[in-house]
Image: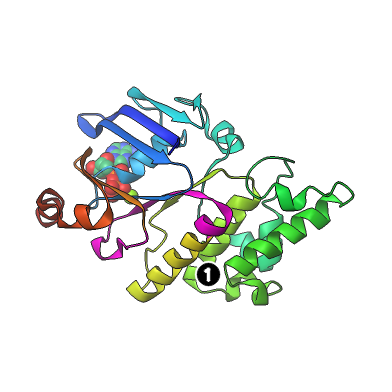
Amino acid sequence: MQEMLRVENLTKRFGGLIALDEISLDVKKGIITMLIGPNGSGKTTLINCVTGFYNPDKGKVTFDGKIITNWPPHRIYELGLVRTFQIPQPFQKLTVLENLLTAYRGHPGEGFLKAPFRRSWMKEEEKATEMAFRFLEILDLDHMWDHPASNLSGGQMKLVEAGRAIMSGAKMILMDEPAAGLYPKLAQELFYYLTEMKNKLGVTFLIVEHRLELILDYIDHVYAMARGRIVSEGEPDKVLDDPIVIESYLGG
Ligand SMILES: Nc1ncnc2c1ncn2[C@@H]1O[C@H](COP(=O)(O)OP(=O)(O)O)[C@@H](O)[C@H]1O
Ligand SMILES: [Mg+2]
């Protein structure tokens, strides 16, 4: 399987603190990779370095075959490595459909779902709307298309964020603790729909999570961090049972 994102020997210091200590990892195309680790282990710092919000002190980041180390965030976003943020306040008033449409960048031939939208006679807006409805169906949100985003539950809001990311032409979606504040059952539902996006659209995901109980069977690959290092890697069951992972949680 081909990798979408490759991180090599990434190091980030804050004064005397080594937040990332020679981190290397691969995110393969079309699967869900999860990055776990206790609070303070460096997960968000890693995401910040990968997406250009921080410059690493050392190391290399390659996305879709291009070296993107030290690129500014907007260029990395334009390349299709998209990080979801909480929908800012103004979007709460927009409908679910409008939230997706405002993310559309109209890059023909880029991102997901090129084939069904090749009809050249279609106006851009029609294409975007058809695309948005297709995504909303997959996320079971099509019946809420004309509701304001403020009507959505926390989990549904996260799905709209993921929908906005694919509308923007993302090749890979990065989510930092999307299940924060959700009860385990709702968190599992959220991950179920992200899996649907993976299966039906071929989206590549890197999902950061600190709760061990949310590592699920249908997550494909897990990396575990502790104190700025990768301490374990592999299939979910294997990583969950790894004494080093358990100890890192108990210790910190
Ligand atoms: N901007 C910053 N300035 C100084 N220290 C930081 C900064 N960002 C993160 N850190 C420190 O780096 C370490 C890793 O933090 P973080 O990446 O947020 O961990 P996680 O996301 O795994 O909880 C922590 O000790 C944190 O206090
Ligand atoms: Mg964090």
- Look at the image and give the residue range highlighted in magenta: 197-218
- Above or below 158: residue 26: above
Residue 31: % across, % down:
44, 49
Query: Which of 223/247 is in front?
Result: 223
**Residue at far front of view:** 1
- Above or below 1: residue 150: below
Asked if residue 198 lies in the magenta stretch, the reply is yes
Image quadrant where residue 129 sits: bottom right
Image quadrant where residue 231 sits: top left
- Above or below 61: residue 155: below
Residue 175: % across, % down:
44, 52
- Residue appearing at x 36%, y 31% in the figure: 7
Q: How many marks?
A: 1
Secondary structure beneath label 1: helix
Residue designated by label 1: 156
Residue 229: % across, % down:
21, 37
- Residue appearing at x 47%, y 42% in the figure: 29
